[in-house]
Image (spheres, helix red, strand yellow):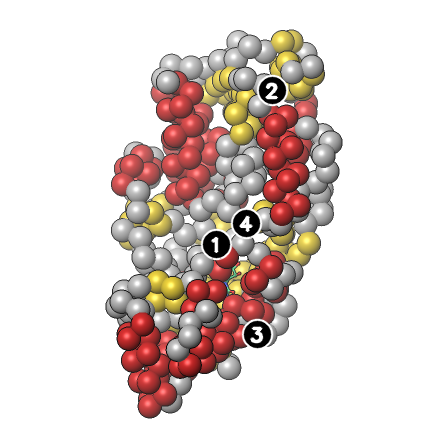
C-alpha cells in the first residue's frame, strides 16, 4: 500500500513526492496529463528549440533555500529575463524605468520627469502603478497617467477582461515602476533557467524507486471522498493525500465554479534566425494577443528558424481550455472559503499549489510552499 497519494505532478506535487520519498515513504503520484511538470512543462520542438508549452516560465527567487533545493536536480544556465513593451510603435524596456523615460519622451521632458521621480522616491525603489497614480506632484501625475494608459490599462483589460482597478492591486504591482537603470524584469538575487529544462528537472526529482507515477489518470478514477472518509481503489485510505488540482473539482463543484482566466497559446514557426529584440515583447495597445515570447532568446539554440508564442487571453471554460490565472473577486474568495471549510473536515487531506490554494504563485513560491507543507506534515 501507499503512504502518500499525491494528485498532480506539477511542481507542488513533484516537490512533495520527492520530499516524502526521500523520507522513506511510498508514494503514488497521479497526473491527468500525459506528462509531468504541470504548466512548467517544456519540450524541444521541430526547430530544435526548447519551448514552454503552457507559456513562458522564468525562474527567479530571493530565497536561497528554494534555489539550493532545486539545484540538487538541475544545473543552471544563468539568465536575466528582459521584457519590452511596444509603446507608440516602439519597443521599450519594462518594468518602466529611468531608461524607458529617455526612450519615450524628448530629452528635456525626460529630465524633468526623472527629477520629479528622484525628488519623491529613493533611487532603486519599485513603485506599483496604482501607488504612483495617487501622487500629488503634477509631473508625477502626468507620468503615472501616461504609464497607466500606455502599459497597464489595455494590457490588463486584455489579460484579465477587467481594468486594473477591478483586480487585486498585487497583480499590477508585480510589474512596478523602477526608479533606476536596471532593465531586468526581476530584481531577485537568483535568476536562471534549468539548463535542460523544467521537465528534466522534475523527472530528476521523481526518479526514485518508491515513487509510482500514474500518468493520463484522472483522480476520480482512483479516489473518491465519501462521508468525510477517503477511498482509494474502492478501499478506505488512512494515509496522507496531497491534492494540487482545482479545489472545486475535489468537491464536485458543489458551491459553484471558481473563476479563472485562460490563454490560447499560439506557437508559430518563423523563417528567420531571430524575430524580435527581447525574449518577451508585450503589446499593451495593439492586437488581441498580450505578448510574444521568442524561446530561442531564453534557451539559445542553433537553428535557422525561430519559434514564437502569441498569447490570446480567453474566458476559462471547464473542459475546453486551461485554468491559468485565478481571478480574485470578492465572490470568488467567498466561494473558495466554502471549499476550504469542506477541506478541513478531512484531517489527512492537504491542498497545495496555484490551483488548490487559488493563489497567483510564481515558481519559487510554489516550491517554497511545498517545502513548508512537508515540514508541517512531518512535524
Ligand atoms: N501588466 C500590464 N502590462 C504589461 C505587463 C504587465 O498591464 O506590459 C500587468 C497585467 O495586469 C499583468 C500583471 O501586470 O497581468 C502581471 O504581469 P506579469 O508579467 O507578472 O504576468 P505573468 O507573466 O504572470 O502573466
Q: Position of residue 343 (x, y in %)?
A: 60, 25
User: Which is more N-terminal, label 3 or label 1?
Assistant: 1
Sequence-wise, the earlier of marks 4 and 2 is: 4
Question: What is the number of the mark on residue 285?
Answer: 3
Residue 86 horizontal/vertical position (percent):
49, 75
Mark 2, other Cα within 10 Å: few <14 / some 14–19 / many ≥20: few
Does label 3 or label 2 sit earlier along the sequence? 3
Question: For mark 4, what is the residue?
Answer: 54
Question: Which circle, 1 or 4, is nearer the viewer?
Answer: 1
Q: Residues within 10 Å of mark 1 (few under 14, many from 20)?
A: few
**Distance from mark 3 CB to nearest ligand 1 atom below 8 Å:** no
Image quarter where the C terminus lies is: top left
Q: Nearer the viewer, residue 316 or 45?
A: 316
Look at the numbered disc 3 and give the secondary structure of its residue. loop
Mark 2 beta carbon near ligand 1 (under 8 Å) = no
How far separated are the C-alphas under marks 1 and 4? 23 Å
Q: How many marks?
A: 4
Residue lying at 56% horizontally and 63% vertically, measured from the top left = 164
Q: For marks 3 and 4, give the CA distance.
A: 23 Å
Amino acid at each position: 500500500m501507499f503512504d502518500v497519494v499525491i494528485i498532480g505532478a506539477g511542481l507542488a506535487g513533484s516537490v512533495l513526492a520527492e520530499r516524502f520519498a526521500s523520507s522513506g515513504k511510498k508514494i503514488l503520484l497521479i497526473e491527468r496529463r500525459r506528462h509531468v511538470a504541470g504548466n512548467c512543462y517544456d519540450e524541444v520542438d521541430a526547430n530544435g528549440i526548447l519551448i514552454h508549452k503552457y507559456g513562458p516560465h522564468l525562474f527567479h527567487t530571493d530565497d536561497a533555500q528554494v534555489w539550493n533545493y532545486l539545484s540538487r536536480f538541475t544545473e543552471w544556465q544563468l539568465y536575466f529575463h528582459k521584457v519590452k513593451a511596444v509603446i507608440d510603435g516602439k519597443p521599450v524596456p519594462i518594468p518602466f524605468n529611468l531608461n524607458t523615460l529617455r526612450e519615450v519622451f524628448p530629452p528635456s521632458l525626460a529630465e524633468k520627469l526623472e527629477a520629479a521621480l528622484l525628488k519623491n522616491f529613493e533611487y532603486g525603489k519599485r513603485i506599483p502603478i496604482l501607488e504612483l497614480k495617487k501622487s500629488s506632484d503634477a509631473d508625477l501625475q502626468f507620468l503615472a497617467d501616461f504609464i497607466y494608459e500606455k502599459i497597464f490599462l489595455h494590457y490588463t483589460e486584455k489579460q484579465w477582461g477587467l481594468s486594473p482597478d477591478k483586480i487585486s492591486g498585487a497583480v499590477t504591482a508585480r510589474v512596478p515602476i523602477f526608479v533606476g537603470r536596471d532593465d531586468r524584469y526581476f530584481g531577485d538575487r537568483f535568476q536562471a533557467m534549468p539548463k535542460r529544462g523544467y521537465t528534466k528537472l522534475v523527472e530528476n526529482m521523481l526518479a526514485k524507486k518508491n515513487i509510482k507515477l500514474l500518468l493520463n489518470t484522472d483522480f476520480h478514477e482512483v479516489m473518491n471522498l465519501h462521508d468525510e472518509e477517503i477511498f482509494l481503489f474502492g478501499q478506505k485510505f488512512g494515509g496522507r493525500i496531497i491534492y494540487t488540482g482545482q479545489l472545486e473539482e475535489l468537491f464536485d463543484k458543489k458551491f459553484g465554479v471558481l473563476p479563472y482566466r485562460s490563454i490560447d497559446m499560439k506557437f508559430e514557426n518563423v523563417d528567420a534566425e531571430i524575430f524580435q529584440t527581447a525574449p518577451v515583447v508585450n503589446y499593451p495597445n495593439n492586437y488581441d494577443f498580450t505578448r510574444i515570447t521568442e524561446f530561442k532568446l531564453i534557451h539559445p539554440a542553433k537553428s535557422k528558424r525561430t519559434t514564437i508564442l502569441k498569447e490570446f487571453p480567453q474566458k476559462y471554460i471547464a473542459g475546453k481550455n486551461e485554468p491559468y490565472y485565478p481571478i480574485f473577486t470578492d465572490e470568488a474568495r467567498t466561494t473558495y472559503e466554502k471549499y476550504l471549510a469542506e477541506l478541513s473536515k478531512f484531517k489527512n487531506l492537504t491542498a497545495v499549489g496555484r490551483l488548490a490554494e487559488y493563489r497567483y504563485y510564481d515558481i519559487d513560491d510554489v516550491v517554497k510552499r511545498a517545502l513548508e507543507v512537508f515540514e508541517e506534515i512531518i512535524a
